[in-house]
Amino acid sequence: MRVNGNRVIKPAFAIGAGDTLTFPQGRNIRVVRILALATRRGPAAEAQTLFDDLTPPDTPKPARVGARPTKKDRRDLDASRDWPDTSEG
């Protein structure tokens, strides 16, 4: 996690309004700017009003074409690749 571009190690690092947070979320990197701090723990809709999401929009992933390969298709594909044979032993 980074606060204003600086790596943060301590989990109790103090943040405030105007700080920019950069952190991993799943496989993506998220960037948010804190607009204000809440006085109480509340619903997610309320929390979303307290920060501005600066994360660039994701590029859409190409859609899967066709059906899922069958087991035979997978074996044929593996056989067509130039992999070392590990079945001998």
Image (spheres, grey):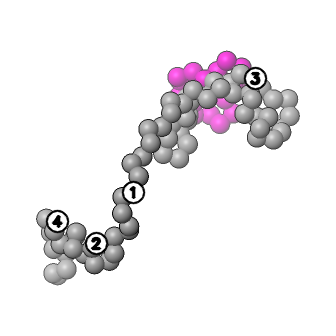
User: Sequence order check: which comes first, mark 3 or mark 2?
Assistant: 3
Horizontal side, residue 73 vs residue 51: left or right: left
- Is residue 6 inside the magenta stretch? yes
Quickly name the residue at label 4.
81
Q: Amino acid at mark 2?
A: Arg
Mark closer to the observer (1, 4):
1
Mark closer to the observer (4, 3):
4
Q: What residue is rendered at 65% in x and 26% in y? A: 52
Displayed quadrant of residue 30? top right
Quickly name the residue at label 3.
36
Bounds of the magenta segment: 4-21
Quickly name the residue at label 1.
64
Horizontal side, residue 31 vs residue 36: left or right: left
Residue 64 x, y percent position in the rendering: 39, 57
Q: Amino acid at mark 4?
A: Arg
User: Sequence order check: which comes first, mark 1 or mark 2?
Assistant: 1
SS at mark 1 in the image: loop
User: Sequence order check: which comes first, mark 1 or mark 3?
Assistant: 3
User: Sequence order check: which comes first, mark 1 or mark 4?
Assistant: 1
Horizontal side, residue 14 vs residue 46: left or right: left
Q: What residue is rendered at 22% in x and 69% in y? A: 77
